[in-house]
Image (cartoon, coloured by chain):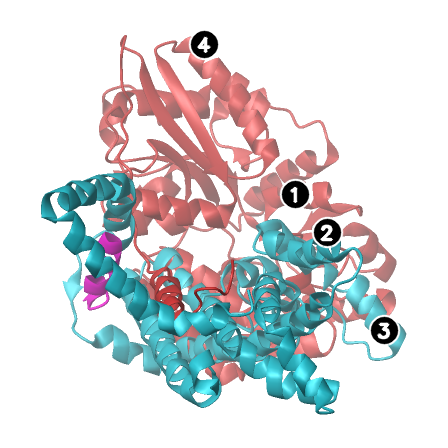
């Protein structure tokens, strides 16, 4: 178990070599039949992918360069949709709102996930129960009903309002307040820290015990051990979580849509990117513009992902680097 | 999920897969026909409304299917907003319902896109009668000589008031009262009852339309807006000042009350809306609600007109005759009138109007309101609603409401509204 991480990097070329050797041994014809069977088994998935994902994606790429209102055939407008975006105050607002959500929500969620994972990593009674309990919100968090619950929790005179009033800083309901409603969405995503927590937990279990023992012998305190052993050792897991949660955050739609009662308001305070995309596409029938927005989002997410990958050289330690 | 194989490659793959599932907008239409095995024809009928309306409509359909055993009616319904979102997608995919509820803001939009069936030939073929309608009401469904909708219930804009609060404040609305008197009343109500007098009059397109009509303009012209940025700046600035003064409900509260109205939630004493909506307030809230006259500029003209909910048909339907028979039954059969009541407005055909005698206070009041308005001679002709009117109505409500959040200046909001209106006309 303890050596698993060590093996990771070396194992890749090894398997590849083995595979090549295997191909040589079995020979071509049998291999081909096997491949065919493989593709056959995959065919429902492939068909689904081509029809439901790849096809629409290509179509939307085309629409992105057209003026398309769903009813008349698309009219080529070149880059108009893209230049229009930058002049559109509501588009700018949606970028601002989404960025705010990603930048505030993701780190908070990951911090909480890591914190709870550290607590749960120590063996104690009822561990399984705690894990399940903390994970539960992630299972139901994406549902519309939770959005409704959130909406009523954060309204005027509801529990959050009353608690705040009791503590002496009343702001009224968050849902109707353009300055506060964003934190209502952030609270909702942070509450669903279960999925990254489980991944962190798995990562923590992989850290070799002997490292801690050795560090303890040398007199390193708990913080030192965390900073110099735990964090570097789980940095690939941390990287994985940062990446997934960031990409995921950019796509927020459901909670903003439900908490704002489909308006993505008030005052566009929850007008997240996908919500504006939805409004333009399905309410205003500006499918060309909406498609262009979708591709812009893809570009932005790709860019952020690229930056994260570039940055990992600085802070992510794969086992062989540490050696 | 283990970390066993968690190397760069895996992460890259996972990231790639995640990025690929990004919601890239694409509309797919599902084809579907209404098969006829033994000469039986199935038509699809969709509408917006609440559960209550659905119950009544289903009862009516049962009667229809008794009379026409060879026609089956498949139904579905949504809320107002989701109805039109869904309809737009269905219509774009070439698969709109055969017959559906509609309103004047949508006629030109979908006529322009070739979605609506001209019912005139069906009238001429004798499948649908335009006789026995209350005076002038079928006009609402006419566009450029085509009959695109048949009214099922007519309504007028009105002022719905919380009678208890008005009484407590000692305010008595009277026909022909002026805007000054009305605004004064809002303040009196605020002072005497601590309830804001109105829930947000300045964000309601149909009311602004009435105000403009009182002043010789209208919200829409044939192909654009009938007012300029100065007009709207004045209207919204006044509205915003009244929010700040507490005479009009804080939009923060309005937002949180949704989907309830702030009037029925007790956070405002009056609301401008269609008269048949009183039914809804009565069901939602626990005060006593009634109808009051629209304030005027000159002491007489309210700018009101008869609008209506209609039934329209799809130009793509394979059963225009059956659809026409269905509409005919729904608007003329007295039994249907008895079942539906004033749920969609005052019944439009004389047969149904005569068949239904409102028993409860609310429906009686609606009937009296429309009678009084008609008698007062204030009803004018409906002005055009060009394609895009629906989007503009929503933008007016949203941008006007956002103003009260104090996040934008009136001048910016007005500019934003005009930009969005322009885009909506062109769409």
Residue B271: x %, y % from top left: 66, 57
Q: Earlier in the sequence, mark 4 or mark 2?
A: 4
Give coordinates of residue B413: x percent, y percent: 48, 78
What predominant SS class does the magenta segment belong to?
A: helix
Q: CA distance from mark 4 to mark 2?
A: 39 Å
- Distance between mark 3 and mark 2 Cα atoms: 25 Å
**Residue that numbered label 1 is attached to:** B280
Depicted B379 relative to depicted A266: above or below: above
Instruction: Residue at 20%, 42% (x, y): give it.
Output: A34
Does residue A151 sit above or below A45 in this rendering?
Answer: below
Q: Whole-Å distance between the Cαs marked 1 and 4?
A: 31 Å
Q: Is residue B396 above or below residue B64?
A: below
Q: Is residue B204 magenta?
A: no
Residue B244 as seen in the image, left or right of residue B339 = right
Quarter location, residue B275 = top right
> Answer yes or no: do the residues labelled 1 and 2 have beta carbons within 8 Å?
yes
| Image quadrant assignment for residue B145 | top left
In this rendering, the answer to whether A60 lies above or below A178 is above
Circle on res. B264: 2
Q: Nearer the viewer, residue B111 or B180?
A: B111
Chain A drawn in what color?
A: cyan
The residue identified by callout 4 is B66
Q: Residues within 10 Å of mark 4 (few under 14, many from 20)?
A: few
Q: How many neighbours does mark 2 have within 10 angstroms: few (below 14), some (14-19), or many (20 or more)?
A: many
The residue segment tinted magenta is A54-67
Q: CA distance from mark 1 to mark 3?
A: 33 Å
Q: Residue at x 40, y 45 (%)?
A: B86
Kindly identify which chain the residue marked by label 2 belongs to: B
Letter of the chain that mark 4 sits on in the rendering: B
């Amino acid at each position: 178990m303890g050596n698993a991480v060590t093996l990771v990097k070396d194992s890749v070329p090894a398997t590849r070599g083995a595979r090549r050797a295997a191909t040589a041994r079995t020979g071509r014809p049998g291999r081909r039949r096997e491949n065919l069977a493989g593709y056959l088994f995959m065919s429902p998935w492939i068909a689904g992918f081509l029809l439901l994902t790849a096809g629409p994606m290509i179509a939307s790429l085309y629409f992105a360069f057209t003026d398309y209102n769903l009813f008349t055939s698309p009219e080529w407008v070149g880059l108009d949709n893209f230049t229009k975006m930058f002049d559109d105050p509501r588009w700018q607002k949606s970028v601002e709102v989404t960025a705010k959500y990603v930048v505030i929500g993701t780190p908070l969620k990951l911090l909480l996930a890591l914190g709870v994972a550290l607590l749960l990593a120590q063996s104690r009674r009822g561990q399984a129960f705690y894990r399940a309990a903390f994970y539960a919100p992630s299972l139901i968090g994406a549902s519309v009903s939770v959005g409704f619950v959130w909406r009523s929790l954060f309204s005027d005179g509801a529990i959050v309002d009353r608690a705040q009033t009791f503590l002496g800083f009343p702001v009224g309901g968050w849902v109707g307040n353009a300055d506060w409603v964003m934190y209502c969405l952030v609270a909702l995503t942070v509450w669903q820290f279960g999925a990254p927590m489980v991944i962190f937990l798995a990562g923590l279990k992989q850290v070799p015990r002997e490292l801690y023992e050795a560090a303890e012998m040398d007199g390193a305190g708990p913080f030192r051990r965390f900073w110099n052993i735990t964090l570097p050792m789980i940095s690939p897991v941390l990287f994985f979580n940062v990446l997934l949660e960031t990409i995921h955050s950019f796509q927020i739609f459901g909670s903003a849509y439900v908490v704002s009662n489909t308006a993505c308001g008030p005052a566009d305070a929850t007008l997240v990117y996908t919500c504006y995309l939805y409004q333009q596409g399905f309410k205003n029938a500006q499918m060309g513009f909406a498609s262009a927005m979708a591709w812009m989002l893809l570009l932005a997410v790709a860019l952020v992902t690229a930056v994260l990958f570039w940055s990992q050289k600085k802070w992510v330690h794969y086992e062989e680097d540490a050696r | 999920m283990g970390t066993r194989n968690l190397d760069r490659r895996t992460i890259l793959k996972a990231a790639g897969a995640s990025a690929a599932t990004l919601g890239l907008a694409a509309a797919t239409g599902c084809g579907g026909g209404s098969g006829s095995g033994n000469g039986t024809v199935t038509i699809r009928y969709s509408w917006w409304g609440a559960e209550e309306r659905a119950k009544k409509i289903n009862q009516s359909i049962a009667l229809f299917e008794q009379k026409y055993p060879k026609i089956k009616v498949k139904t579905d319904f949504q809320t107002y907003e989701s109805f039109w979102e869904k309809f737009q997608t269905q219509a774009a995919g070439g698969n709109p319902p055969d017959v559906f509820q509609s309103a004047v803001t949508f006629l030109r939009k979908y006529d322009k896109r070739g979605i609506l069936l001209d019912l005139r030939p069906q009238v001429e073929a004798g499948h649908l009668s335009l006789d026995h309608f209350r005076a002038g009401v079928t006009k609402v469904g006419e566009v450029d000589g085509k009959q695109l909708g048949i009214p099922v219930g007519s309504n007028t804009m009105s002022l719905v008031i919380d009678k208890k609060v008005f009484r407590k404040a000692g305010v008595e609305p009277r026909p022909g009262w002026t805007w000054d008197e009305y605004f004064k009343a809002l303040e009196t109500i605020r002072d005497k009852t601590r309830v804001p007098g109105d829930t947000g009059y300045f964000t309601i397109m149909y009311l602004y339309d009435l105000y403009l009509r009182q002043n010789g303009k209208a919200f829409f012209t044939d192909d654009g807006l009938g007012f300029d940025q100065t007009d709207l700046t004045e209207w919204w600035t006044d509205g915003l000042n009244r929010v700040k003064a507490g005479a009009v409900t804080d939009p923060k509260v309005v937002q949180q009350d949704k989907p309830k109205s702030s009037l029925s939630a007790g956070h405002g004493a009056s609301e401008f809306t269609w008269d048949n909506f009183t039914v809804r307030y009565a069901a939602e809230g626990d005060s006593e609600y009634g109808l009051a006259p629209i304030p005027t500029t000159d002491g007489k003209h309210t700018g009101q007109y008869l609008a209506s909910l209609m039934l329209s048909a799809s130009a793509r339907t394979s059963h225009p005759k059956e659809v026409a028979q269905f509409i005919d039954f729904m608007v003329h059969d007295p039994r249907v009138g008895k079942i539906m009541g004033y749920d969609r407005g005052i019944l439009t055909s004389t047969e149904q109007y005569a068949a239904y005698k409102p028993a409860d206070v609310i429906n009686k009041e609606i009937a009296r309101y429309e009678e009084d308005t008609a008698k007062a001679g204030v009803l004018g002709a409906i002005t055009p609603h060009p394609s895009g009117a629906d989007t503009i109505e929503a933008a007016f409500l949203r941008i006007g409401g956002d103003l009260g959040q104090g996040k934008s200046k009136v001048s910016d909001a007005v500019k934003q509204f005009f930009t969005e209106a322009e885009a909506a006309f062109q769409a």
